[in-house]
Image (spheres, rainbow, N blue to C red):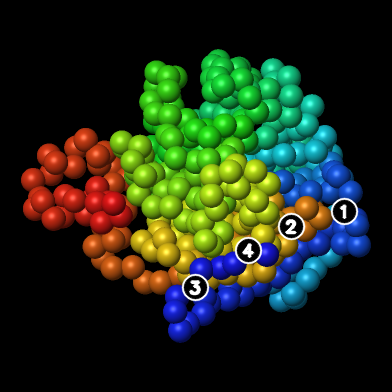
Amino acid sequence: MANLKAPKNDEISSASIITELIPFHTSRKQHNSGLESWSCAFSPDESYFVWSSGNSVVTLLPWSFCKHTVFKNKKVTVPFTSGQGKHDAEDCFGCNTKSINTGHTVHLVLATGHANGRIRTWDVVTGKLILELLDHSDMVSHLAFNPAGNLILVSASYDGALKVWDLLEDGNMFQTLKMNNKPIFSCCWSPDAKTLVSVGMCKLVYVWNMKTMKVKFKLEGHQHDVVSCAFSPDGCLIVSASWDTRVILWDSHNGQILRTFGHLYPSPHLIYACGDNGTWIRDVSFSSDGAHIATVADDGYLRFWDITSEQYPEAIAAVENALCCKYAPSGCILAVGNKYGSVSFWNAPACIKSLLYLSRISIRKVVSAENVPQLGIPKSLEGYLLYKELE
């Protein structure tokens, strides 16, 4: 394991585990390809949790079942009986859920991406297949629903393409975006659905204007392939994770680097960061409070970070072979999937934020960086709204 940088005369807090869900097929004595949990997701209303649990299976659990039954035990074997959904899949590498409002009824749609390039959408309640989307020529690595609620889906694939689908138009694929014709690992929408970020087998972070479908920025700063990305809840910040052992926090308005969170201490030299350094970061997730991020890496640690401090993690836990992580919409719990198909749940660090901080989140959700100077507020507050204290 890598050396952790810690404050003098003190230790980093230990994150506490709530429980672990273990598929019936899981055996930790040996690892076989195809058992990995590559992806996990919460429904927007936090009513369901879903993860790719290995053996071509996607497991769907009512979140109330988890909280009231599963969380009472430290480890639970999931046998795929009543109360859970089971979908056969050719190695689901990306899964996501989206709610549809039809009158007074809310329907949840699950999208799964597969190793053969197919995308399938499912009715969460009935478990029935809705659509099968065919256009990718290689593994689908990530899926992201438009947060505007119009069932626009973006898929990322190892074929080097991002494809934009309209599920309300029978899954019409109406746009293809290309980065560098190399595998794409992850993508995410901004909360206002105007911007998309994508990362893949290159050192750049691509920022797209989704109105023009053109590249807005190519962010430079990483020294190895970039594997994961996420937006802050107000859309002002972008976080990207790389195999170079670092996570970078960016200003989404101008592409400026605001913070760098190193996972190896001391920071590796360029030639080491570009290779198999033993601390490849696998995933990053942004908390709903906009103040924390979580990361999992090959050095066997789960880390929780306060974005205002890049010196050391706020809390850590030993989690070996982790592949993905995702905050619950409430921000209180983090789910972590591993290479054995299991998923564990962790208490996420939380603190009461000031009214000033909460006001910034609310204001920036509706006021763009370009319009902040027009608010007629003092320069100090203007700078705060623009996250100048992070520079």
- What is the three-letter code of the residue carrying label 2? Asn
Q: Residue at x 44, y 79 (%)?
A: 8
Q: Indicate the secondary structure of the residue bearing disc 2.
A: loop
Q: Within 10 Å of the Cα at label 3, are there few (<14), some (14-19), or many (20+) other Cα atoms?
A: some
Of labels 1 and 4, the one closer to you: 4
Sequence-first disc among 1 and 4: 4
Mark 1–mark 4 distance (CA, rounded to whole Å): 23 Å
Q: Indicate the secondary structure of the residue bearing disc 3.
A: loop
Of labels 2 and 3, the one closer to you: 3
Relative to 285, residue 153 above or below: above
Q: Is residue 183 visible?
A: yes
- Farthest residue to the bottom: give it: 9
For label 4, the residue is 2
Q: Residue at x 81, y 55 (%)?
A: 340
For label 2, the residue is 321
Sequence-first disc among 3 and 1: 3
The spot of residue 334 in percent (x, y) is: 59, 61
Near-viewer residue (280 or 250): 280
Sequence-first disc among 2 and 4: 4
Disc ID at residue 6? 3
Sequence-first disc among 2 and 3: 3
Dividing the picture into quadrants, the one containing residue 96 is top right
Relative to 31, residue 334 above or below: below
Mark 4–mark 3 distance (CA, rounded to whole Å): 12 Å
Q: Indicate the secondary structure of the residue bearing disc 4.
A: loop
Relative to 130, residue 21 above or below: below
Q: Residue at x 36, y 61 (%)?
A: 308
Q: Residue at x 54, y 62 (%)?
A: 265
Dividing the picture into quadrants, the one containing residue 77 is bottom right
For label 1, the residue is 31
- What is the three-letter code of the residue carrying label 3? Ala
